[in-house]
Amino acid sequence: MTELLFRDDAYTREAVATVTRITSEGGIVLDASVFYPTSGGQPGDSGSLQWGKREIEIATTVKGEGDEVILIPAEPAALPSVGQQVTQRLNWDRRYRLMRMHTALHLLSVVIPLPVSGGAIGAEKGRLDFNMLDAPEDKAALEDDLNELIACDMAVTEEWITDAELDAQPDLVKTMSVQPPRGSGQIRLVRIGVGPETADLQPCGGTHVANTNEIGRVRIGKIEKKGRQNRRVYLHLE
């Protein structure tokens, strides 16, 4: 089991941890991780591990068995041993852009209030696929609405509900193809805004900025037709 430090504080860039396992493919499992593993459309973090005078680059991070987080080295190299203490450091610039983009995509689902059939988060651009028959008539107006929402200086917070509470509020789930993970007894919600000023509330396990003003301005890019009733909307950070 890996303690998910990125969930406790998405702004933690560096931490000391202990190696608990080396996988047969050369992946490194720590007892605590600041690295987010690929899931929910958000790519895994990259960065480095250091122990003594040795250091290796981490190319990406993936989920393992149970609650394990596996760090994947960028190239074959000498690995730390089980029980070794290491210092993990994020590629922070990339992670922070992913946090900004992920939060912006939540707000895109607000200004386009349609079911989401897919999505992907990138450091430069992201996208959501909507169950949308026709493309929006005024993309510029949509972009203005989104940037106005971002500029509202809204706090981004988390809260937890039970599986039964989520079942009683099925409208919280906007994604058609991906359902929140169940089995632990609790499901994490990300809220943008406070109380009656809440702009968005939905299940999400990813990393986000603490306030929408950190996102900055965004630009809506191409809107592609991906099926009879599916439109892909691209979003760019500026």
Image (cartoon, rainbow, N blue to C red):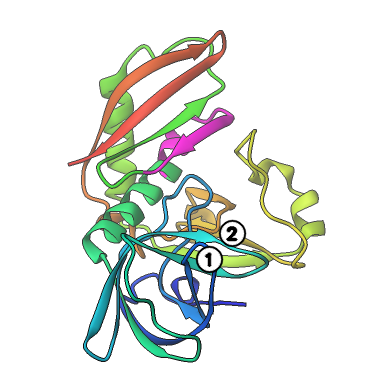
Tell me, for residue 189, which label it has, or none.
2
Specify whether residue 20 is painted magenta.
no
Q: Looking at the picture, how far across and down is residue 215, in whole percent?
A: 27, 52
From the viewer's side, name the closer residue of 70 and 160: 70
Decide whether residue 120 is among the magenta residues.
yes
Residue visible at 25% across and 83% down in the picture: 54
Query: Left or right: 9 with respect to 23?
Result: left
190 or 207, which is in the foreground? 207
- What is the CA distance from the residue labelled 1 to the residue labelled 2? 6 Å
In which quadrant of the rendered image does the C terminus lie?
top left
Q: Position of residue 163 (x, y in %)?
A: 78, 58
Circle 2 residues within 10 Å: few <14, some 14–19, many ≥20: many
Tell me the residue at 76%/64% (across/down): 162
What range is drawn magenta here?
107-121
State the image coordinates of residue 111 (x, y, percent, origin top left).
43, 33
| Of callouts 1 and 2, the N-terminal one | 1
Q: Is residue 39 above or below residue 9?
A: above
Which residue is rendered at x = 49% and y = 71% of the image? 7
Q: Horizontal and vertical percent for residue 32?
A: 49, 81
